[in-house]
Every structure is written in structure tokens, then in C-alpha cells.
Amino acid sequence: MMENVKKQWLPRILIGGAAGAAAHLLLGYLLGCFSLIGPAGFSGFHFPDCGFPYELEPLGVILSFAFFALFGAEVGVATLPFADSGRELVVRSLIHYAATAATVSVWVVLNFGWNGTLPAFLVPLTLAYLIVWLGRWVGWYAEVAAIRAKLGLTPGPSPLHWKESLPYIGFACLLCLALPLALRLLDDPTPVLSVMYAWLLLPVGGFMSGLSLGRRHGFCPIYPAACAGFVLIFIPLARLCSNMADGALIPIALVSALAGNLAGAARYKLKQRKGAGMP
């Protein structure tokens, strides 16, 4: 066990920790703490100082470096396979995510306080984690599909039904990104079209498309997430042409698509039971 830690864990922890410290050094450069060229030299502690008072500011900067190094070490550990069995893998992954999120949260709260800035850090972290997990699932599915093909077996359903959801992702892009952008550009001077979209077109379109996907393939959680993701992309783009508050569109897109998909999945499961002759 100790030999395994030394060979696999320790190098990744050291490399990740060094990369985290280097990232913090880069952050200090971007904040104007020092200059790599010219005579500017050191211009004071502009590094994040974890909210320490002026007298202890250097200690706060050191603590901030330590948090970045810890975060880098956690990212380095994530390059290791956590487990072979599915349940153990999920549990250990959740533990790792919780530890990483806790490190980021403590650093953010110390430096910025409880001023609503925490989601700005945790949301990208969570999305990155989900993207990595999705990439691993796709890789595992491709390996299993290749094995089944060599054995002459028909491929089973893809993990989280990602493959079955792909044709609907294009519709989600149209419904949750292209259509609201087009309506926003046409909405001058009154936002009638945008209001109609938010309270009619989006919920109905999300529910019906999710229902259709669920009736064909069962529960497909990627599709509601994709709808919410496209709305997240739409919101900053919409800011370029209007100042409307669009935050409510995210839960509307997510809930409507999810509700439709769950309803369709229930009908799909009922149809399967009837086909199998179950009561």
C-alpha cells in the first residue's frame, strides 16, 4: 500500500501542488504584485491575503498559496483511477469533489466574504467535474461497445443515454439559444416576444421535447442539463443587446425539460412492462 502511494499518489500530489502554487504566482503577476520585465520590481502584497489584517498580511498570502497548492494537489490526485467497481468509484469521486469544493469555498469566503461570489467559483468547478465525468463515461461506453461488437453482441444502451440524447441536443440549442437570441433582437422597443418565450414557448417546448425523448429511450438526464446549459450561454449573449433579467429562464428550461422527460420515461417503462407481460 505504501509503495503504491509513493509510486502513484506522491508524484501527482507534488506536481499538482507545484502547479497550484505557480498558478497563484501567475495570479499575483496579473494583480500587479510584481513585474517580470522592467524596473517595476515588487510593489507590495497584491496577492489574495485571506482577509488577514495589515500586520499579518504576509501570513495571509502564505495561506492563500497553501490553498492553491492544496487545490493543485487535489486536481493531481484526480488523474488517478479511484476504483474498479462502479459503486466504489462513485463514492470516492463524490468524496473527492466535496474535498475540492470545500478547498475552493474556504479560499473564496476568506478572500471575498459571503457576498454572492461563491457560485461564480463553484459553478465552473462543478461543470468541469461533470464534463470530465461525462468524458470518462463516453470512453468506457466506447470500450464496452467495442468488446460487445467483437463478441457479436448487440450494443446496450449508452451511459445516461447520452448517445440517444444527441439528436435532441440540436433541438435544445435551437430552443434555448438560437430562438431566444432571435426574439431578443426583434424585441424592440417592448419585450413582448421575450416574455412570451419565457412563459410559453420555452416551458412548452422543453416539456414536449423531453416527453418525446423519454417515450423513446427512457430517462435521459443529459437533455434537461443541456437545455439549462444553452440558456446559461444565452444569458451573457443577451446582455449585449438588452438589460433584461434572464435568470428565471434557467430553472424554467431545466424543470420543464426534466418534467417532460420523467413523464415520457414513466410511459416508456410502462410500455416495457406491458411488452414483457408483467401485471
Image: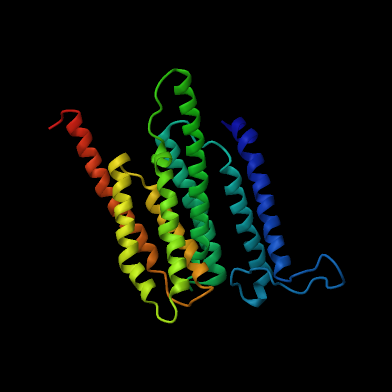
Residue 242 locus on image (x, y percent): 49, 76
Residue at the left extreme?
279
Image: 180 above or below 94: below
Residue sitting nearer the eye, 100 or 222: 222
Residue sitting nearer the eye, 249 or 19: 249
Residue sitting nearer the eye, 184 or 221: 184
* Numbered-mark total: 0
Which residue does the image show at 43% across and 18% down from the upper left?
152
Image: 239 above or below 152: below
The quarter of the displayed image where residue 213 is located: top left
Image: 176 above or below 152: below
Which residue does the image show at 74% across and 70% down from the upper left?
33
Which residue does the image show at 67% across and 76% down from the upper left?
55
The quarter of the displayed image where residue 176 is located: bottom left
Residue 231 locus on image (x, y percent): 44, 62
Residue at the front extreme?
186
- Horizontal arrangement in the rendering, residue 58 relative to residue 166 (left or right): right
Residue 245 locus on image (x, y percent): 42, 74
Residue 97 locus on image (x, y percent): 48, 49
* Quarter of the picture holding the N terminus: top right
